[in-house]
Image: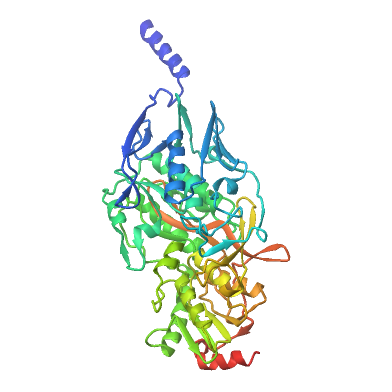
């Protein structure tokens, strides 16, 4: 009896010395995987290492040195930013990572924070002219020759934002030091360092690693999954571990709190609070990935419903599933408008509307999305006389040739964006440069407070000079808009109207002010949101939101009259 009592006392003392959970042995398992870079045929030369802590085999971590090497590779080799460089200083629990431009990110492992002295400056490309430069083209070819775009440094300017801290401890997200290794969850690296500046995410399907975004998984033009997605979904569906379920929920809250650009208009204080108010927090935390994905999809479709926020693909853990049943109010409305304007146009043009058309003294340029499909050099080497335009930039080059040809009758130029749902920023900037000469593009980061105005010119006649011969600013300029005109289809008319050089015709545009941010969940769901980078127009030194659309100078009440170009040309000529 005494020996039993003594043994019990000893066990109590041991329990007191080792609190609950502390007795579990820590472990770090290193595994190496093939890393696919947007295509099944493009991989890193060598398998890439990730770590799994304490027996949890579905929640990968990156070690600090591996993370830095990966960031340099993605920026230099994948994005062509040769000037991007990183250095690192270790001070035990604090690790400071510095860019070549002097800006830094400090990882405080004791306090669970990642602090940037300037998040925008740390993230932006070394090729950028301004703090928030959304143009993806550098403006130079591999030989240093000017191509397509020129940034006007003298007319561009910045207002720097606040210091930015991601407090991971507030979300229960752990970075850990074990021995001489520093571990950060791969999804946290993806959400903070990869997705915002580069536009794609780091994904893991249990068999391989991927750097991809939604458009690399699904070919929307063909309406089919890509070979990369087939590879991604080869992994058998499975349940999420408890650790992954909890981490994924916390990471989702963290990234949405920091990167969603429309928290104010949506009256969102924190996403954890909003998920609880809606009643989907338990589903988002579920071990069942299909339940979690369905909850996230419902939230994006019905509660965000901002058209830029889209549930793209189910996680590999849930398996490939149908995503076509989006029924949010904004989606329904813009589809209804799109059907109405599409039918009205088809009634006038049953064989399809021409991309470029001349009606008397008026040229009409029509496209339904801003497309930029090639790198800049391709426009100089691949465009041939008479070649049919197959993206927006090529179309504008072709239209410019026709409008400025000898003895051209064209006095009026009408940009028809009445069925345009947006698209590539590069193409939008090219169109603005063509119509205005100087193309202003203003952006505000709603997360950091930073603001930038960049001014660009476009080389429309492909002579590698940026001058008045590249614009149609000497013509009478018009833009046709409707409730379908969204995103870049809304940005361009806003910039055109604020210039006081272009007259808007039609009905109030559809809005859309934030750029698209591609993201993923820690268990492999792909989605996108309205990012923290809000496109704006500048007037009297102030940045104005364009999310509610822009009103035309002249309303067109009957939708059929949008496409009666004989009557529209007569109306325009009467405005002189």
**Residue 294 appears left or right of 425:** left
For residue 494, above or below residue 573: above
Residue nearest the observer in this picture, 202 or 399: 399
* Residue at the farthest right position: 540
If the image is split into quadrants, where does the C terminus sit?
bottom right
Q: Residue furthest top?
A: 2
The residue at 47%/63% (across/down) is: 302
Vertical side of 287 occupied by 560: above or below: below
Q: Is residue 418 visible?
A: no
Quadrant placement of the N terminus? top left
Residue at 41%, 66% (x, y): give it. Answer: 381
Please give the name of the residue rendered at 49% of the width and 49% of the height, measured from the top-left corner: 81
Q: Position of residue 292 (x, y in %)?
A: 39, 51
- At a point 53% along the width and 81% down the height, the residue shown is 404
Q: Is residue 514 in view?
A: yes
Q: Which quarter of the figure has residue 335? A: bottom left
| Location of residue 490 by image quarter | bottom right
Query: How many marks do you count on the picture?
Result: 0
Counting from the top left corner in percent of width and height, residue 245 is at 40, 43
Query: Residue 497: image x %, image y %?
Result: 64, 75
Structure colour scheme: rainbow
60 and 474: which one is in front? 474
Relative to 397, 39 lies left or right: left
Residue 62 in percent (x, y) is at 42, 37
In the image, 493 versus 18, the foreground residue is 493
Q: Is residue 408 above or below residue 401?
A: below
């Amino acid at each position: 009896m005494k020996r039993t009592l003594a043994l019990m006392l000893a066990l109590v003392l041991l329990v007191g010395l080792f609190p609950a959970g502390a007795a579990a042995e820590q472990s770090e398992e290193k595994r190496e995987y093939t890393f696919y870079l947007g295509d099944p045929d493009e991989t890193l030369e060598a398998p890439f290492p990730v770590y799994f802590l304490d027996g949890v085999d579905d929640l990968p971590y990156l070690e600090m040195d591996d993370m830095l090497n990966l960031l340099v590779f993605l920026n230099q080799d994948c994005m062509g930013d040769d000037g991007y460089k990183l250095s690192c200083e270790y001070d035990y629990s604090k690790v400071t990572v510095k860019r070549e431009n002097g800006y830094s990110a400090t990882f405080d492992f004791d306090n669970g924070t990642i602090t940037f002295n300037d998040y925008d400056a740390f993230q932006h490309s070394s090729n950028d002219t301004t703090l928030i430069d959304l143009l993806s083209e550098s403006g130079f070819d591999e030989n240093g020759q000017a191509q397509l775009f020129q940034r006007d440094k003298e007319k561009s300017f910045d207002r720097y934002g606040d210091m930015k801290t991601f407090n991971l401890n507030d979300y229960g997200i752990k970075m850990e030091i074990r021995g001489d290794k520093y571990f950060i969850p791969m999804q946290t690296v993806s959400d903070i360092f990869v997705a915002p500046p580069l536009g794609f995410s780091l994904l893991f399907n249990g068999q391989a690693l991927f750097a991809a975004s939604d458009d690399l998984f699904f070919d929307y033009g063909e309406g089919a999954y890509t070979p990369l997605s087939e590879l991604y979904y080869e992994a058998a569906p499975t349940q999420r571990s408890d650790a992954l379920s909890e981490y994924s929920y916390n990471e989702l809250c963290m990234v949405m709190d920091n990167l969603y650009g429309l928290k104010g208009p949506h009256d969102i204080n924190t996403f954890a609070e909003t998920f609880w108010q809606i009643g989907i927090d338990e589903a988002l935390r579920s071990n069942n990935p299909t339940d979690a994905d369905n909850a996230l999809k419902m939230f994006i479709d019905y509660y965000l419903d901002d058209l830029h926020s889209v549930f793209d693909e189910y996680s590999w853990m849930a398996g490939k599933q149908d995503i076509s049943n989006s029924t949010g109010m904004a989606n329904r409305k813009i589809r209804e408008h799109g059907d109405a304007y599409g039918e009205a146009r088809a009634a006038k043009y049953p064989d399809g509307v021409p991309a470029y058309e001349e009606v008397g003294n008026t040229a009409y340029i029509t496209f339904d999305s801003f497309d930029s499909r090639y790198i800049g050099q391709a426009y100089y080497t691949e465009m041939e006389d008479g070649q049919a335009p197959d993206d927006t930039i090529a179309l504008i080059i072709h239209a410019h040739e026709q409008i400025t040809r000898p003895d051209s009758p064209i006095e009026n130029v009408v940009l028809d964006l009445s069925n345009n749902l947006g698209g590539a920023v590069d193409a939008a900037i090219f169109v603005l440069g063509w119509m205005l000469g100087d193309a202003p593009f203003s952006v505000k980061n709603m997360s950091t407070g930073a603001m930038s105005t960049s001014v660009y010119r476009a080389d429309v006649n492909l002579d590698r000079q940026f001058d008045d011969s590249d614009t149609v600013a000497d013509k009478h300029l018009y833009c046709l808009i409707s409730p379908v005109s969204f995103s870049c289809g809304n940005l361009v008319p806003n910039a055109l109207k604020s210039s006081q050089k272009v007259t808007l015709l039609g009905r109030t545009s559809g809005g859309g002010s934030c750029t698209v941010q591609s993201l993923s969940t820690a268990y492999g769901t792909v989605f996108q949101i309205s990012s923290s980078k809000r496109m704006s127009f500048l007037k009297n030194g102030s940045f104005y939101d364009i999310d509610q659309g822009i009103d035309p100078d002249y309303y067109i009440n009957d939708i059929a009259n949008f496409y009666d170009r004989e009557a529209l040309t007569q109306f325009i000529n009467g405005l002189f």
